[in-house]
Image (cartoon, rainbow, N blue to C red):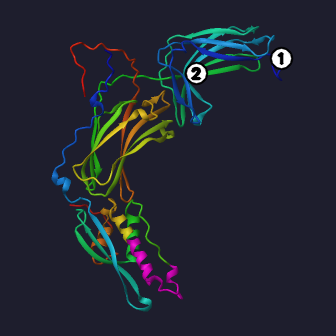
């Protein structure tokens, strides 16, 4: 009998191997709090052990099998019932029977593909987790444990600068330039704004980073914009021929890599928004997409200095 | 000796700016536009009175044919301009100072809409309105604005249209 508090029940703990050397990463939860989980990359094995602790001493736990699953799934907040699993692996830990005492089982998902980065957004969430299920006749005992996956990229072969002349006919012409089109998450955006024609009374200029999360497709496409960063780069009225420098350090902001059409379910793209404000609070703006990518962390190695080179004083 | 990884010095260096000529740096600004609403005069007597104001404009914007102009306009002319801009252009037109219906009722202790203080407040509001509107790049393309600012008489039967600067 396993209802009304009679019958045995159990606690499940999932312990990942190598957790003493593995890094933790942070991710936001749906309600905005930050959580830490172990960080994995594509191709790495996910292994460890499952500890099952019987809660009532002296009683056996009958079950229809115990299994562990590795799942990668996309949850669209407006469509909660349907989780889209893009990765699903299962291993049977033990066949149907009964447990007489606390038991531990090893598991090893070898070289698991993790094609996408973990992401928690405004309308969609992509997560990877392990799920242990003790199958029983009336109610299963389930435990989930999340991991975080980062996707790494390397310096792109082509990374041209962005340079464009924009404006309003006869009123305002500017040329803007950003040193690259693809930036890694700890990169610096270096740019400049050059004024060709200024027939309006400009009060100040600011630059912002906008994140656009797109969910759904076709007529049901939904875009959500979020301003991640904003700051003033010029105060006062410029004249023709003036150049205003831009230097924006990305490491200080909560950014993810650009994600395009992930499993055909969602995209996350980033834009630089240049805004000029005139004395009557009218806003003139130009948005430009930039691609963000995640660089792998290099471990520091000591380098031997050749004897003949004196230390530089700069 | 150990050597630390140095941040490459180019990675945050400013982009090379184009040099600004001294002419450009010290020239008169290309955005000079000043409009004063001044000199209120109440014409007529008794119930046939009305107040008008001088609208004086100085500018170097090429879109305006005259670099200096002076016309006289009354409150209803400003209302006409606002209606025309709302109808013909896509801009959100700022509000005018109030119509002051209460002041037009009889048996007031003061001069109603011909009261000096009221006219002064209204004058300031009209000046704010016309400067806001005249500085708007889209409003600058409207014939009604050019006629309002630079032609002596308002032709309310005009054909609305856009102006391009030559």
The answer to whether dots 2 and 1 both sit on one chain is yes
Q: Quadrant of the N terminus of chain A?
A: top right
Residue drawn at 56 percent across, 12 percent down:
A17
Question: Residue A13 at what x, y percent from top left?
Answer: 65, 17
Question: Residue B47 at what x, y percent from top left?
Answer: 45, 90
> Circle 1 sits on which residue?
A1
> Residue A14 falls in which quadrant of the image?
top right
Q: Which comes sooner in the sequence, label 2 or label 1?
A: 1
Residue drawn at 54 percent across, 14 percent down:
A20
Q: Which residues are magenta?
A: B101-126
Question: Residue A292 at what x, y percent from top left?
Answer: 39, 31
Position of residue A265 relative to residue B122, above or below, is above
From the image, give the main secondary structure of the stretch colored magenta: helix
Residue drawn at 62 percent across, 19 percent down:
A131
| Tag in front: 2 or 1 | 2
Q: Nearer the viewer, residue A84 or A256?
A: A256
Is residue A73 among what the camera can see?
no
Q: Nearer the viewer, residue A247 or A60?
A: A247
Residue A150 marker: none
Residue A129 marker: 2
Position of residue B111 relative to residue A159, above or below, is below
Chain bearing tag 2 is A
Question: Residue A213 at what x, y percent from top left?
Answer: 47, 37
Is residue A87 among what the camera can see?
yes
Residue drawn at 39 percent across, 24 percent down:
A295
């Amino acid at each position: 009998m396993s209802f009304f508090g009679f019958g045995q029940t159990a606690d499940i703990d999932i312990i990942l191997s190598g957790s003493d050397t593995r890094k933790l990463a942070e991710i936001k939860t749906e309600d905005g709090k930050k959580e830490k989980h172990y960080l994995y990359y594509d191709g790495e094995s996910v292994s460890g052990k499952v500890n099952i602790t019987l809660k009532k001493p002296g009683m056996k736990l009958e079950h229809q099998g115990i299994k562990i699953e590795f799942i990668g799934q996309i949850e669209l907040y407006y469509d909660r019932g349907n989780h889209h699993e893009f990765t699903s692996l299962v291993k049977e830990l033990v066949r149907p029977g009964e447990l007489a005492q606390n038991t531990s089982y090893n598991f090893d998902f070898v070289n698991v593909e993790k094609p996408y980065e973990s992401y928690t957004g405004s309308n969609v969430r992509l997560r990877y987790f392990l799920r242990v299920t003790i199958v029983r006749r009336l109610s299963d005992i389930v435990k989930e444990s999340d991991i975080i996956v980062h996707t790494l990229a390397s310096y792109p072969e082509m990374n041209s600068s962005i340079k464009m002349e924009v404006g309003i006919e006869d009123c305002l012409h500017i040329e803007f330039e950003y040193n690259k089109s693809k930036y890694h998450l700890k990169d610096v955006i270096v740019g400049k704004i050059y004024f060709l024609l200024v027939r309006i009374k400009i009060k100040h200029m600011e630059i912002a980073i906008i994140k656009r999360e797109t969910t759904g497709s076709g007529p049901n496409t939904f875009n959500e914009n979020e301003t991640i960063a904003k700051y003033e780069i010029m105060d006062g009225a410029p004249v023709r021929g003036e150049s205003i420098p831009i230097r924006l350090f990305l490491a200080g902001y909560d950014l993810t890599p650009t994600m395009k059409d992930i499993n055909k379910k969602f995209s996350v793209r980033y834009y630089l928004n240049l805004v000029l404000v005139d004395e009557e609070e009218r806003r003139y703006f130009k948005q430009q997409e930039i691609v963000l990518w995640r660089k792998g962390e290099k471990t520091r190695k000591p380098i031997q200095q050749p004897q003949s080179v004196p230390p530089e004083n700069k | 000796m150990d050597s630390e990884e140095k941040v490459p010095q180019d990675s945050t260096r400013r982009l090379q700016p184009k040099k600004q000529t001294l002419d450009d740096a010290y020239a008169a600004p290309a955005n000079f536009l000043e409009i004063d609403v001044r000199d209120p005069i109440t014409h007529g007597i008794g119930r046939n009175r009305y107040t008008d104001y001088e609208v004086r404009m100085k500018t170097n914007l090429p879109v305006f044919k005259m670099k200096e102009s002076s016309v006289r306009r009354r409150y209803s002319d400003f209302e006409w301009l606002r209606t025309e801009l709302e109808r013909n252009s896509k801009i959100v037109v700022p509000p005018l100072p109030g119509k002051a219906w209460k002041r037009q009722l009889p048996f007031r202790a003061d001069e109603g809409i011909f009261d000096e203080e009221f006219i002064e407040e209204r004058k300031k509001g009209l000046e704010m309105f016309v400067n806001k509107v005249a500085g708007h790049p889209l409003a600058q393309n409207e014939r009604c604005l050019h006629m309002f600012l630079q032609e002596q008489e308002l032709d309310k039967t005009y054909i609305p249209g856009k102006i391009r600067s030559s």
